[in-house]
Image (tube, rainbow, N blue to C red):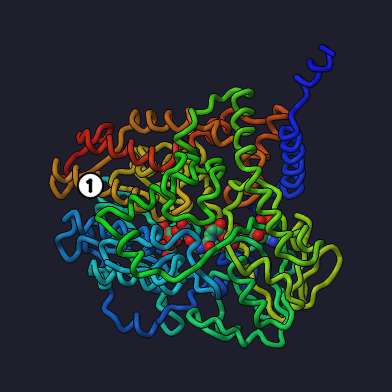
Amino acid sequence: NGSASDDTHILPSPEDLKLFKLSQKYTAEATKRLRPDGVDQFIPLKKSGGERLRALAEDPWVDHTALNAKKCPVAEGTIYKFLILGAGYGGLLLAAHLIDASLVTEPDDLRLVDAAGGFGGTWWWNRYAGLHCDVESYTYMPLLEETSYVPTHKYASGTELREHADRIATQWNLHDKAFFRATVKTVRWDEASQLWKVEVTEDRGPSEPSRELSLQAQYVLLASGILAIPQVPKIPGLDSFSGPIFHTARWDYKLTGGTPEDPTLTGLEGKRVGIIGTGATAIQVVPKLAKYAKELYVFQRTPSVVSWRGQRPTDPVKWKTKIAYKKGWQRERRLNYDLYQTDAAEQGQENMVADGWTEMPAYSGLLGSPRHPIVEPTPDKIAEHVGRLFKLDMAHSERMRARTEEIVKDPETASKLKAWYPCWCKRPTFSDEYLQAFNQENVHLVDTDGKGVDNANQSGLVVAGKEYPLDILILGTGYVTPAVGGGSPAARAGIEIYGRGGKSLDDKWRNNHGAATLHGICTNGFPNLFFMPLAQSGQAVNNVFTLDVGAEHIVHFVACAEARAGQGAVIEVTSPAEEAWTFEIVKQAAWHSSMAGCTPGYLSNEGEFLRHQQQQAKQAQDPAAQFRQARHGTWTRGIASYLKVLQGYRDEGSLQGVEVTART
Ligand code: FAD
Ligand code: NDP
């Protein structure tokens, strides 16, 4: 009998067995999707093979006539103090904080440059039917306290989010400071003048030739976004499809009917519509298409996790008494939201937002957590860390699969819509309409079993030898990963940046020893160049929180430097200081081992972690590549902890590790 109890002692618990089986299923599903071409399976829309596809990248919303009639906001020969690349929420936050800090005093002190035809970035380009923010708008929309704006709903629509960008531009007087339709190509440090030379192409529409301009700026601030370059998979024959095609980031309302404000898509009536992709975009689009298309075919490679939404109008009383009830409420609410995604909420603590995002402590697998120690890079500690996260995720993931089964009536379709990966592997989605749409007779799920669409031809798409004839094809195929070019801020903006001695920023990131920054916002050899935090910084699910923290910190550097060296300050982080910060990041890198089991997607750089793990198993991994990867990690104690570190640095006040000189 004694031996029986010993056996029980060594037997895994039923929960451990379940987890083990689940992790095997997850690995099998991820491996099925792992492709040797990784990110190269895609191409930016504007660089794709056929002219027709390339043209789809153009700005559908720009008013060339109005912009051509306006006085050009920039002139060659003028020295701009701040040149902000990007006029989305990031660029606007930088501009507003610079102005509020009294760093913009002259008319030529500030310019925003953007390829788009207006303010808003993501919310300028994306106007697809069903578009809303996926995190609560009260925490997401920037500068709500300063603008006194009350969002109409818990999740604001795309139009409302774009109008808010205009509101910020108006309040901070930015309309005549924005150079639109202007694509930055090269940013080069000029040692003699100690200024940046910025090469820009201005698109003046079909009736005028484009213009090449060379601008000069003391500071260049990059706010070029993380999901700004629409991409298309290299599906053979795609260009030969004879019907209309468009990408969701450039919605074609002339074709579909309706407007962003009123998605009555009558143009789809009687039509067979296909959409490729089932990511966060498709989850919002599909219910709208399902309402109008005669037949809708949803081509799925990997299902999304679809949680509940709970959209509702803002209650004006609650707004005044519980939400915007005191100065500093928005930062407090953002931090409170973040607690729940970084596994840091205390028992009994108030959950201010209380939505689907706050039911996912395992999302800390991506964001990090202040609650858990830094993961030592040893096999047993890594196994313990990943095991803990799987355990933390299991109940939620099972609930999501059960939710799918409850909503989708056809068991086979329901089974194909279930997601087999932990929540941190892909951005989760929230909808009370998407899964329901598959109960409509006109909606067909074409599951490709992880393989993707085989090819396209004149009449439609082909999957597993079966042809699906279509009248209209919509590409919901996402964006170039922000990890492009090893995560270099230059590659992310699609530009070349040359610093001191003509050194390329991409080269520093990709070919030398890898990323090196102070706090994720500046790098040695590139004076007066700052970028919004991504690698080597704290991240939040609410991207605007990260942008706000980044803008605040960048402005602090400039304000301190000016206090010390006057208006012509030249700021540069020293090499030892950036190495010291990078070392802090490298120490935390083993946290990201949680990404190794992830199904490919842009967050896992199309399975790079899994590929590395498999190479490692074959002992084929290059240690230098491994070290470079570790340097590209994030601050894995969560954004609240990152913010505390930045605050401590600012309070100390001496700009440690930064050299400040004055332009001569
Ligand atoms: P963007 O809004 O992407 O703006 C960057 C701007 O830089 C663009 O207008 C682009 O044209 C310009 N630009 C880039 N390179 C160049 C160049 N070389 N020359 C000139 N101009 C250039 N995040 C959330 O937290 N919650 C959400 O709900 C959410 N929803 C999203 C929905 C969609 C469809 C997408 C694509 C992303 C979403 N995101 C969301 C992420 C979103 O991108 C950020 O929240 C935020 O809006 C980014 O702001 P940004 O200013 O940093 O970048
Ligand atoms: P994603 O990259 O998330 O989705 C692209 C989709 O295209 C995936 O389902 C992908 O499958 C599929 N796909 C790619 N190639 C093929 C192929 N060859 N055959 C079949 N399918 C293919 O892009 P999204 O635009 O959906 O979202 C990007 C990000 O933007 C989100 O993660 C989110 O951060 C943000 N966003 C937020 C929204 C919000 O709710 N406010 C709305 C929209 C976007 P696979 O997964 O297998 O790669």
> Tag 1, which secondary structure?
helix
Quarter of the N terminus within the rendering: top right
* Residue 471 makes an appearance in the image: yes
Query: In which image quadrant can residue 575 be found?
Result: top left
- Residue on which disc 1 sits: 558
Give the amino acid type for the residue marked by disc 1 in the picture: Val
Whereabouts is ligand 1, in terms of quadrant? Answer: bottom left
- Examine the rendered structure and indicate whether residue 88 appears above or below residue 103: below
Q: Position of residue 348 (x, y in %)?
A: 45, 43
* Viewer-proximal residue among 452 and 433: 433
Nearer to the camera, 636 or 405: 405
> From the viewer's perspective, is 315 left or right of 663?
right
| Left or right of residue 125: residue 658 | left
Q: In what quadrant of the picture does the C terminus appear?
A: top left
Closer to us: 425 or 587: 425
Left or right side of 460 for 347: left
